[in-house]
Image (tube, rainbow, N blue to C red):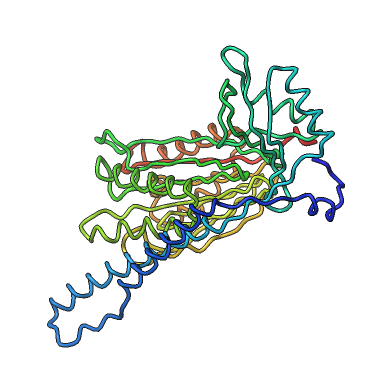
Amino acid sequence: MELGIDQKQRQSRERTAHVPELCRQRLLGYAESFRELSKSFDGDFTGDGLDRQEVLEERRQWENRQMMSRGLSAVAQIMKQVAEEVVRYEPFPEKKRKAIAGAMRAEGIYIDDLCYLPGENGRRTVGMTMYTDRKGGQSAEEAADMLSVLLHRPVQLSVTSPYRIDRTSRSFVFVEEAAYIALTGFARAVKEDELLSGDHYSLIESEKGRMTVLLSDGTGSGERASADSERVLDLMEKMLEAGYPLEAAVGMVNTAFFARGEECGHPTLDICDLDLYQGSCDFCKVGGVTSFVKRGALVEQVAVENLPLGIFQRVETDRIHRELHNGDYIIMMTDGVLDALGEEGYEEAMAKAIGDLREQNPGEIAERLLEQALCAGGGRVSDDMTILVIGLWENSSLY
């Protein structure tokens, strides 16, 4: 979009928008209240002069206060960030704005507030308000196609924008198409004599060209395990969509399970966060088993030795970064799949099976690997099994 434009000229046209002052002051006031409340839970643990049972009880209460303190502090920080957020935008040049408005109007779409919104790594998105007087409305995807032609650069509708244009003026955001596209496939088997799987997975797409894949394995199997893993993903989805950083979201979920006590289950959480603009991903594992990256016949194992959610007050959230290439596959799975391959060397056995695959469709790859795990286990399903496969390809529409 306007490639080659002089950087100084672009900066001179930039405008800024702030949170309205009244809302800003309220948010900052709420943030300060939460921060002060957080401090009230601070303090060191001593346990002096107490017997063993009293020490254990006091220790538990102190740990709960620490969790409350961290949670309130995280909420206060997010409120402060929102209150101080500055949105930069750049109005379209008048000649181009009129050309786009005229072309859209010819198709029955009326636009206003047309501007560029700076994004990450120099990428810019297009924002506008739109409405139509056509009965039944129009697809916003059609507007994206028109905008791509008019801007001489492929753009797509952001995942947060409405899907249809109707008689009510609404805000729409169009983003540059990512350099890569990701296709996913999955296969699963439920443990024998159980109706519900203790494994759950979720895919979250954002307007910043990211796809976050979540996989959780509940302790044991059946209804209880299913409820635990489903709760993990529900909490993660809500917090990530609300704007929590990945590490903060994982920490909050761990806190929720730790506070429930030792009698509750300890589900795993396996995360793969993909950047579809850069062609890279970050793995974050909390008790999850080995994942695999396949590039042709070469297979890399990605493993972290740490414990599931809720066992310790704090959880390790170290990221493992990997650069990806066209045609790479990411394979994630739960422990039921690997355990079916035997007690020793199962990661190597799975890596060999993945390297030998010739299928290209992610769904077919997942099904094939599940078949091999079932065969290795003599056809028995001793634990829930779930396999997720993500394939990455260059976006041909950009070339």
Q: Position of residue 245 (x, y in %)?
A: 50, 56
Name the residue nearer the viewer: 106 or 332: 106
Q: Position of residue 225 (x, y in %)?
A: 28, 45
Which residue is at a point 62% across and 14% down the rendered structure image?
A: 134
Residue at the limit of the structure toward the front, as seen here: 22
**Figure check: 373 above or below 99:** below
Residue at 68% across, 21% down: 109
The vertical placement of 323 against 100, above or below, is: below
| Left/right of residue 373 with respect to residue 89 in the rendered view | left
The answer to which image quadrant residue 249 occupies is bottom left
Q: Is residue 267 above or below residue 136?
A: below
**What x and y, as percent, mark residue 351?**
54, 50
Judge whether 211 appears above or below 46 on screen: above
| Residue 312 visible, this angle | no
Q: Nearer the viewer, residue 335 or 82?
A: 82
Visible in this render: residue 103?
yes
Quadrant in the picture for residue 195: top left
- Residue 69 drawn at (x, y percent): 34, 67
Q: In this rendered view, identify the residue nearer to me: 341 or 148.
A: 148
| 358 to the left or right of 342 | right
Side of 34 where 279 appears, left or right: right
23 on left or right of 183: left
Residue furthest bottom in the image: 49
Q: Quadrant of the N terminus?
A: top right
